[in-house]
Amino acid sequence: SKSISKNGGRTSYRGLVKVYPGAKNSKSFVRCDALLLDDASRSDTYPTTEVDEPQVRIGHEATVSKVSDEQLFYLQSRGITKAEAETMIVNGFIEPFTKELPIEYAVELNRLIQLEMIGSVG
C-alpha cells in the first residue's frame, strides 16, 4: 500500500495475512510506504499475521518518509518552483502504482495530485 498525508492528515494501514493449516510453502510479503508532506501529518501501520502452517515464508515492511529540504533545494536550484518540486516528488513516489493503471486512470490521478498540490504551498 502507499499513502500520502498533508495538512495534518493521518493514514492507517491494517492488514491481515492468514495462512491456514495445510497451505504449505505459502509466501506473502506486505509492503506499506507512506509519504508525509508536513510535520503535522502521520502514518500508522498495523500488519497482522496468523500462521497455522510451519512451512511458509511471511514478511512485512513499512517505510515512512518526508519530502526533504535537500530534495526541494536540488529541484529549486534548477528553476523549479517549490510547488512543482513537491508535485514531482509525490508523482515519483506513486509512479510504481500509477504505471500499473490503465492510462486514463493514471492521467486523472496525476491531474488530481497536481490540483491538490497547487494549494499546498504558499
Image (spheres, helix red, strand yellow):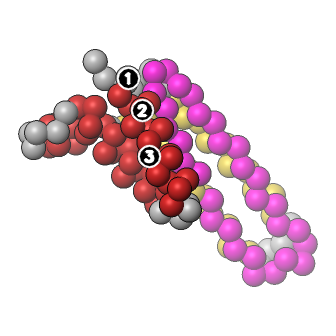
Residue identified by numbered label 3: 110
Q: Determine whether the residue tagged by mark 3 lies in a helix, strand or loop.
A: helix
Most common SS among magenta residues = strand
Specify the amino acid type for callout 2. Answer: Leu
Disc 1/disc 2 C-alpha distance (Å): 7 Å
Specify the amino acid type for callout 1. Answer: Gly
For marks 2 and 3, the one nearer the N-term is 3
Give the left or right position of residue 55, taking residue 119 as reference.
right
Looking at the picture, tell me which residue is in the foreground, 82 or 73: 82
Q: Is 107 above or below relative to 25?
A: above
Mark 3 surroundings within 10 Å by alpha-carbon count, few (fewer than 14), some (14 through 19), many (20 or more)? some
Q: Residue furthest top?
A: 122
Q: Position of residue 1 (x, y in %)?
A: 59, 51
Task: Determine the residue positioned at 63% across, 36% down.
Answer: 12
Task: Determine the residue positioned at 36% across, 52% down.
Answer: 92
Mark 2 surroundings within 10 Å by alpha-carbon count, few (fewer than 14), some (14 through 19), many (20 or more)? few
Looking at the picture, tell me which residue is in the foreground, 19 or 55: 19
Residue identified by numbered label 1: 119
Mark 1 surroundings within 10 Å by alpha-carbon count, few (fewer than 14), some (14 through 19), many (20 or more)? few
